[in-house]
Amino acid sequence: MLRKEARHTIALALPIIIGELAQMALHLIDAAMVGAISYKQLAASALVINAMNIPFVLGIGMTISVSQMVSLAHGRNDRQKVSHYLYNGFVLCTVSAVLIAALLLFGAPLLRHLKQDPEVVELAIPFMRLMGLSIIPMMLFMTLKQFADGLQYTKTAMALSLAALPLNILLNWLLIYGHWGLPRLELLGTGWATLITRTLSFLLLALVILRHSTFRLYIAVSSRQWKLKVKTLRELLHIGVPSSLQIGLEAGAFAVSGIIIGTLGAVPQAAHQIALSCASFTFMVSMGLAQAGSIRVSNAFGAGDSFKINRVGRSTLLTALAYGIFCAVVFSLFRRQLPLLFNDNTEVVALASLLLLYAALFQISDSTQAIAAGLLRGIKDVKLPTLLVAVAYWVVGLPFGYLLAFRFGWGAPGIWIGLITGLSLAAVFLVFRFLRMSRR
């Protein structure tokens, strides 16, 4: 029975995972193409990604509320509500996207106050402004993607994400290196390529949802349901705000750890970014499983099927455990080869190889905690899990890592041990919380 449920969840998750991996591949390709110029450019890219990660994932958390409420209404066979949640969610996420973009645009000069390498900072500031602008089309794309995913139509966004890969590579090649008579923009070329790719992806997905027959039932009732309601916005915020905080607490811990490591120099920062990029790539699979599990649990929650909630949850957690073990083995075996995909500086490669061993250690807990958090969102249990995550990362993990890095002189590996500790505690907290709630 659990094996059957696991297969259903994986089938739903697979297009989501492919889409997430395609999005992550864009970042990896950017890092690799910029890293080929110099490790200073790679370090500047890493600084921006770390600095904007917290506000960005807060925005992504808001888009998650759309899939949760759409899935709940879909479980009740209420297409009127599905359309209503789409419109209100889109407006809410648009406002959030504009606010986040403004924060990043006007906050870019703050990078000068983070005690980073001055040359790295000057490269990073204009790049951060471009990436801040690209947040708007990215969040709008994610909102529409969450709507389609909530209805369990997960292949639409996947196809567009895959199509964006060759476009982004071509634009990078043209703008980073200055081919076909275009100016050589180096790191800024990556920013322009990202902005153009994200804008086109959003426009194409919007066109599909508005015109395709698959979504016609929900667009047809727009004249009655596309109205803002305070009650609906509150429902979305009830899921979106804790989800944003929960994801932001984890991403924030990684972002702050990257900024702390940046105070140790450009080499540790570049090595950290390489190891984190690899870990983030594998994490996208966990995110896809978490979202699929959450959608299926939310659908069962809307239908009032508590037995199915338990089955889906347990089978998804077992899948997370198996996947985490697989990733740990891969990272351990290929820790010396993977850094060479990003940079050939001897010091950077050596430190990145060491950090990949630590990344291998937290693959199991990282996958498990992400999926447990998604399952809890599916049953609308978000407040206490957010508090538990805050304690794991910010009260235990980061302070412990800082202590090891600076008081005991362990440097970057000390920070990573702190991250492992925080992730492991979060996994234990969230898994036990879901098992307890699902038994109710």
Image (cartoon, helix red, strand yellow):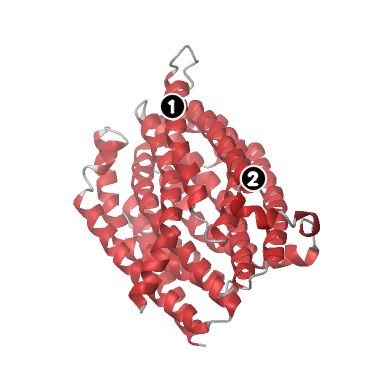
Q: Tell me where residue 192 sits by quadrant.
A: top right
Q: Secondary structure at mark 1?
A: helix
**Label 1 sits on residue:** 170
Question: Dot 2 surroundings within 10 Å: few (below 14), some, or many (20 or more)?
Answer: few
Looking at the image, tell me whether mark 1 or mark 2 is earlier in sequence order: 1
x 49%, y 62%: residue: 291
* Mark whose residue sits in front, 1 or 2: 2
**Three-letter code for the amino acid on which mark 1 is drawn:** Leu
Q: Residue furthest bottom?
A: 440
Q: Percent from the top left, x then y, of residue 58?
A: 59, 55
- State whether residue 399 is above or below residue 192: below
In the picture, the quarter occupied by the N terminus is: bottom left
Q: Percent from the top left, x then y, of residue 89?
A: 68, 57
Does the CB distance between marks 1 and 2 fall below 8 Å? no
Label disc, if present, on residue 211 of the rendered structure: 2
Residue nearer the viewer, 382 or 157: 157
Q: Residue furthest front?
A: 213
**Three-letter code for the amino acid on which mark 2 is drawn:** Arg
Q: Tell me where residue 88 sits by quadrant.
A: bottom right
- State whether residue 431 is above or below residue 145: below
x 26%, y 32%: residue: 344
Residue nearer the viewer, 10 or 143: 10
* Residue 389, visible in the rendered structure: no
* Residue 354, visible in the rendered structure: yes
Q: Residue furthest left?
A: 333
Q: Percent from the top left, x then y, of residue 245?
A: 58, 62
Q: Secondary structure at mark 2?
A: helix
Q: Percent from the top left, x then y, of residue 101?
A: 65, 42
